[in-house]
Image (cartoon, rainbow, N blue to C red):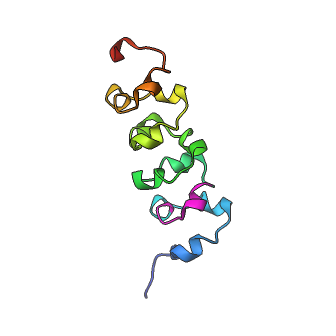
């Protein structure tokens, strides 16, 4: 007897691109990583948190704003610059130091940054 497992085969990348938003939300992490940029933009926050760094870098600003601090820390400098002030304030000191000075000056001063 072949094929004991009853799990349906995972959809191929091409098929993933045709899935409705609802089904995208049920995909395992491995498949989320195959999605094109415009579909990443349909994912809920919970799933954005499963994405690897290079996919996070494709997200628009409004989605970056939903990411938890741990993921913000993986973003490259130019994306950090798009974040709103309250999110920048969550970043660790060494990351803040990579930001342009005029951006840092807009943040409330923390003793650690002086």
Where residue 90 sits in the image (x, y, percent)? 45, 27
Residue appearing at x 50%, y 61% in the figure: 32
Residue at 44% across, 63% down = 30
In percent of width and height, residue 14 lies at: 55, 76
Q: How many marks?
A: 0
Picture quadrant of residue 63: top right
The residue most toward the bottom is 1
When the figure is inspected, residue 107 is found, relative to residue 26, above or below; the finding is above
Question: Which region of the structure is painted magenta?
Answer: 32-41
Q: Residue furthest left?
A: 94
Q: Is residue 92 left or right of residue 12?
A: left
| Quadrant of the frame with the C terminus | top left
Residue at screen point 53% across, 42% down: 64
In the displayed structure, 37 sits above or below 53; it is below
Residue 29 visible here: yes
| Residue located at (46% from left, 27% from top) | 103
The image quadrant of residue 100 is top left
Instruction: Please indicate, yes or no, whether residue 11 appears anywhere in the rendered image.
Output: no
The residue closer to the viewer here, 65 or 27, is 65
Q: Residue 2 colored magenta?
A: no
Magenta span includes 38: yes
| Residue furthest front in the image | 102
Quadrant for the N terminus, please: bottom left
Q: Give percent across and percent down for residue 82.
A: 52, 38
On screen, residue 28 versus residue 43, left or right, reads left
Whole-percent x and y of residue 96?
38, 28
């Amino acid at each position: 007897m072949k094929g004991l497992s009853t799990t349906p085969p995972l959809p191929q990348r091409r098929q993933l691109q045709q899935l409705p938003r609802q089904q995208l939300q049920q995909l395992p992490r491995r498949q989320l990583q195959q999605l094109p940029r415009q579909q990443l933009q349909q994912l809920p926050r919970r799933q954005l948190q499963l994405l690897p760094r290079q996919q996070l870098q494709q997200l628009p600003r409004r989605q970056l704003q939903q990411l938890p601090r741990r993921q913000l820390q993986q973003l490259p400098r130019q994306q950090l610059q798009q974040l709103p002030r309250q999110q920048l304030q969550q970043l660790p000191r060494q990351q803040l130091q990579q930001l342009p000075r005029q951006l840092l000056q807009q943040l409330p001063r923390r003793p650690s940054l002086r």
